[in-house]
Amino acid sequence: MKSTVDWLRRDCADTSARASRRVTPALLANVRVQGQKLEQVATVGIRDGSMLVVTVFEEDNLKHIEAAIYDAKTPPTLDAKSSVVAAARKKEEEARVQCRKLHPTSMKKGKYEKRSIELKVFQDLLDNYVAEIDKFLVDMKKMLGVSR
């Protein structure tokens, strides 16, 4: 269940950072220039905490890199933030379902009695992880400034 929560955090971190307009070199990690990753033809750094600086290795690639960056993503708007939250909501539900599937599986593997203390412990673990998943989405909405 913990790995499911970690998956949700990792999976949503990049999109939420992009939607919140935080600048990190990871924002350009998916940019491909003529079939190569951007890191193979240039370096990406940060200046003043709000500006990405791309240093090209070979000047011949400059136009291709510029075109690839412009084609990659547009700046986020309120609609983009809402779509990020909607996608995160779907992933959140997937994570909840995965945690709920793991609960009966672990019960069968343990072969516990019907009213044993282990059942209560597993149920408490499930409740805690589901609450953590719910809190993650609430925090993401708050960070992005999206109310719905």
Image (cartoon, grey):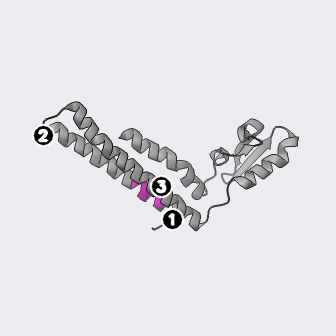
Amino acid identity at mark 2: Lys
Q: Amino acid at mark 1?
A: Gly
| Quadrant placement of the N terminus | top left
Residue at 49% from the left image edge and 66% from the top image edge: 146
Q: Give the residues drawn in magenta, as a range.
A: 135-141
Please state the horizontal and vertical placement of residue 100, each as a whole percent of the image: 31, 46
Closer to the eye: label 1 or 3: 3
- The residue labelled by disc 2 is 114
Contact between marks 1 and 2 (CB within 8 A): the answer is: no
Q: Nearer the viewer, residue 42 or 143?
A: 42
> Which disc number belongs to residue 34?
none
Q: Please, what secondary structure does the residue beneath circle 2 have?
A: loop
Mark closest to the chain's N terminus, 1 or 2: 2
Q: Please, what is the three-letter code of the amino acid marked with disc 3? A: Ala
**In front of the other: 143 or 123:** 123
Q: Indicate which disc residue 145 carries.
A: 1
Q: Is residue 131 magenta?
A: no
- Residue at mark 1 to residue at mark 3: CA–CA distance: 14 Å
- In three-dimensional space, the C-alpha distance between marks 1 and 2, rounded to whole angstroms, equals 45 Å
Numbered label attached to residue 88? 3
Tell me the element at label 3: helix
